[in-house]
Image (spheres, grey):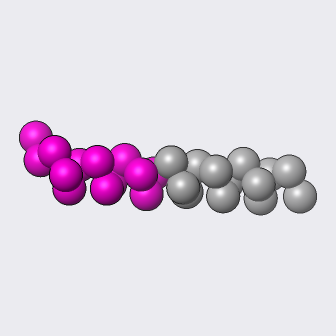
Amino acid sequence: MIYHLVYFLVFLSFDQILAVKEILPL
């Protein structure tokens, strides 16, 4: 169960990184 929570947090952080990359294209 905790593993699913960690996976969910990683997914959210990955989505944030993608959003930041869209805002600041390198």
Residue at x 16%, y 45% (from the top left corner):
24
The majority secondary structure of the magenta stretch comes to helix
Q: Give the tally of numbered discs.
A: 0
Residue at x 72%, y 48% (from the top left corner):
6
Judged from this view, the residue extending furthest toward the front is: 23
Judged from this view, the residue extending furthest toward the left is: 26
Residue at x 54%, y 55% (from the top left corner):
12
Q: Is residue 22 magenta?
A: yes
Relative to 19, 3 lies left or right: right
Q: Is residue 11 magenta?
A: no
Q: Position of residue 3 (x, y in %)?
A: 80, 51
Image quarter of the C terminus: top left
Relative to 21, 2 lies left or right: right
Judged from this view, the residue extending furthest toward the top is: 26
* Magenta stretch bounds: 14-26
Q: In which quadrant of the rendered view does residue 1 lie?
A: bottom right
Residue at x 66%, y 58% (from the top left corner):
8
Q: Position of residue 10 (x, y in %)?
A: 58, 49
